Image: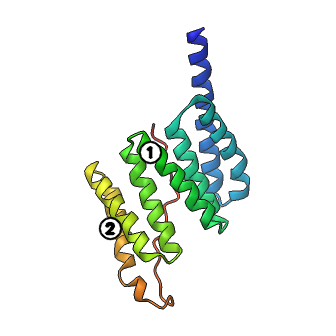
Amino acid sequence: HVRSRRQRQMCIRDRGHTLLLSGQALLACGWADEAWVPLEEALSCYERCGDGRGRAQILRTMSLALQDAGEHERAEQLLCDAHALVVDLQDPIGEGYVLHDLGRINATAGRWSQARLFLGRALVVREQIQDAEGAADVRRDLSLLTGEDRNDGRDRAVPGRHRQVDVRR
């Protein structure tokens, strides 16, 4: 029975991963509304099998969909939930992504000091794990924030976010 339970858990996780990829593909095509159904199903799968990394990835992807819909507060809450998961899992790769996203969403909201704080933390994490490309992305976004808190908003450059979400396990 242990083996059959383990196999069931693996099937549920695999289904969640397939649904995650489906939701990401729909988001990449600009169909945020259509992406929501597979993403919610994927979250349910990951919750049932106890896959915290999968849950964090889904929450991050759902946050992207909400940002596309202009629902930044809900998106930020999902990122905070994802951050709590990756910290509990001691997942520095996931933490680097989520901190970077939190920096970007704070920049979008005009909260420059918060954005710099999250981006600074993301940079430290990405440097610690020797993620040169990720660290360069964070440095670029930090450079875009220079002087933003003194800017009247006319020529504001807000860091963009990457559409691709890490799906490594």
Nearer the observer, 25 or 160: 160
State the image coordinates of residue 87 (x, y, percent, origin top left): 41, 45
In the picture of the structure, the residue carrying the numbered disc 2 is 139
Q: Nearer the viewer, residue 100 or 88?
A: 88
**Residue 135 at least partly seen:** yes
Q: Quadrant of residue 6?
A: top right
In this rendering, the label closer to the viewer, 1 or 2: 1
Residue at numbered disc 1: 86
Side of 129 relative to 113 (left or right): left
In this picture, is 155 found above or below 51?
below
Q: How many marks are shown on the rendered structure? A: 2
152 over 121 or under it: above or below: below
| Image position, residue 61 (x, y; %) | 57, 52
As measured in the structure, the alpha-carbon distance from the residue carrying label 1 to the one carrying label 2 is: 22 Å
Relative image position of residue 123 (x, y in whole percent): 32, 60
In primary-sequence order, the first of circles 1 and 2 is 1
Q: Which residue: 42% across, 58% down?
A: 99
Quarter of the rendering occupied by the N terminus: top right
Which residue lies at the image location 51% right of the left edge and 38% below the top edge?
52
From the viewer's perspective, tell me whether residue 123 is left or right of residue 108. left
Residue 98 picture location, percent across and down: 45, 55
Label 1: how many residues lie within 10 Å, few (<14), some (14-19) or many (20+)? many
Question: Which residue is situated farthest in the top direction here?
Answer: 1
Query: Callout 2: helix, strand or loop?
Result: helix
Type of amino acid at the residue the image marks with label 2: Arg
Q: Quadrant of residue 90?
A: top left
Q: Mark 2 and mark 1 in contact (Cβ < 8 Å)?
A: no
What amino acid type is highlighted by mark number 1? Val
